[in-house]
Amino acid sequence: MIKLTRLNGHSFILNGIYIEQVQSFPDTTITLTNGKKIVVLDSEEDVMLKVTNFYQKVGIAKLVNDDPREVD
């Protein structure tokens, strides 16, 4: 789950699994897998970082290893 802020300043929690697309129009617009769109104050980059951290916490994204000798 990730915490975001709507344009009216109210925060809410979104399940990051349902995010299909994040765009800036210039407002950050999140498109969910069901087609619903949510506009938030958070930047596109902030949403991406929050989603990546969430994916890592729940184990659906590999943690980045800075060792260049390791090959995926």
Image: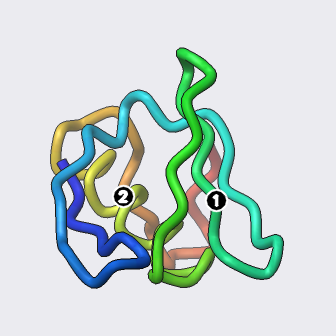
User: 50 or 42: nearer the eye?
Assistant: 42
Q: Is residue 35 above or below residue 61?
A: above
Residue at the far top in the pictured view: 34
Direction from residue 71 to residue 14 in the image, left or right? left
Q: What whole-number distance in Å separates the C-alpha atoms at marks 1 and 2?
A: 26 Å
Judged from the image, the secondary structure of the residue bearing numbered disc 2 is loop
Q: Is residue 7 above or below residue 4?
A: below
Amino acid at circle 1: Thr
Res. 63 mark: 2
Q: Position of residue 67 (x, y in %)?
A: 51, 75
For the C terminus, the image quarter is top right
Q: Position of residue 34 (x, y in %)?
A: 54, 15
Residue at the far right in the pictured view: 25
Which residue position holds label 1?
29
Q: Position of residue 35 (x, y in %)?
A: 62, 22
Q: Position of residue 49 (x, y in %)?
A: 44, 72
Q: Residues within 10 Å of mark 2 (few under 14, many from 20)?
A: few
Find residue 10 and report its image quarter: bottom left
Judged from the image, the secondary structure of the residue bearing numbered disc 1 is strand
Amino acid at circle 2: Leu
The tag earlier along the polypeptide, 1 or 2, is 1
Direction from residue 2 to residue 68 in the image, left or right? right
Q: Is residue 57 above or below residue 65?
A: above
User: 34 or 48: nearer the eye?
Assistant: 34
Direction from residue 72 to residue 19 in the image, left or right? left
* Mark toward the viewer: 1 or 2: 1
Q: Residues within 10 Å of mark 1 (few under 14, many from 20)?
A: some
Find residue 51 and report its image quarter: bottom left
- Residue at coordinates 40% horizontally, 47% vertically from top-left? 62
